Image (cartoon, helix red, strand yellow):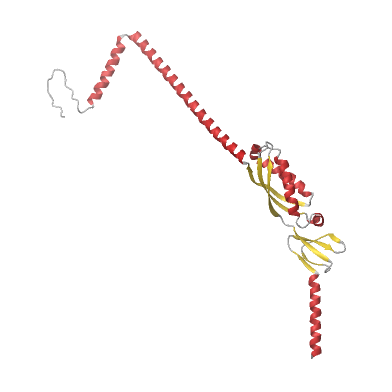
Amino acid sequence: MAKLFESIGKLGLALAIGGGVVNSALFNVDAGHRAVIFDRFRGVQDAVVGEGTHFLIPWVQKPIIFDCRSRPRNVPVITGSKDLQNVNITLRILFRPVATQLPRIFTSIGEDYDERVLPSITTEVLKAVVARFDAGELITQRELVSRQVSEDLTERASTFGLILDDVSLTHLTFGKEFTEAVEMKQVAQQEAERARFVVEKAEQQKQAAIISAEGDSQAALLIANSLQEAGDGLVELRKLEAAEDIAFQLSRSRSVTYLPSGQGVLFQIPQ
């Protein structure tokens, strides 16, 4: 019985050792990832291992897993415009490595390639592009600036084996001096518009006064011509029109009573 237990123990130990060896000889590559094999005797292998479960030589080979999916990264940069204004820009980048160039990336840059490459090339490209525009053009031609940054940065990143799926300007602000200058300019424009309105209003009032004076002059001239042609008849006509208007107004008043000529009836007017 003791020999049986001893045999079972040896068998279990052998299975455990064998399982450990087999387990150490297997590695998994998840979806969207790739692996580079480092061999202790031959260095980094040129072949890139795809998704799935793969074999390797335990203690001799080591897999280095890379994420090949697009990942976002925000890179803030402070630079200067063409007219020497301070500009704060934040660039959002969607990047991923070229799978076939992973051995070269691992050998020449390392696993943290994004930390070593993206901030430096982004700063370089942004400084070069922003220096071509003044502060006003950065606002009015933002789409053009973003397109030039994207083209230059994509070309620059390709030399390091990186693909940029999207490059966009997410934040663009200027220094305190420029902001104050813009506010002062807006206030000056508003004051100029207000002054122009006052001038136009005065001009309109002047034109109205001229037109009114011309109308009065024309009316006086017409009256003088009528008097000259009709004599006192026109004056008498105006008197009759005035008397008719007065009589009409008095007839509508309750406190006034009309007495025909020749009657002496006395009315008591209530107080």
Picture residue at 46% right of the left edge, 22% below the top: 206
Q: Is residue 170 above or below residue 35?
A: above
Left or right of 213, for residue 77: right
Q: Say whether residue 222 is left or right of residue 195.
A: left
Above/below status of 248 relative to 137? above
61 lies left or right of 232: right
- Residue 125, given in percent of the width and then of the height, sits at 73, 44
- Relative vertical location of residue 237 with respect to residue 61 in this rendering, above or below: above
Determine the residue located farthest toward the left in the rendered image. Answer: 265
Q: Residue at x 72, y 51 (%)?
A: 165
Q: Is residue 244 visible?
A: yes
**Res 248 → quadrant:** top left
Quadrant of res 212:
top left
Q: Quadrant of the N terminus?
A: bottom right
Q: Which residue is situated farthest in the front direction here?
A: 177
Residue lying farthest right? 41
Question: In the rendered image, is residue 151 in sight?
Answer: no
* Residue 18 placement (x, y as % from top left): 81, 76
Counting from the top left corner in percent of width and height, residue 68 is at 74, 57
- Residue at 72%, 52% in the rendered image: 95
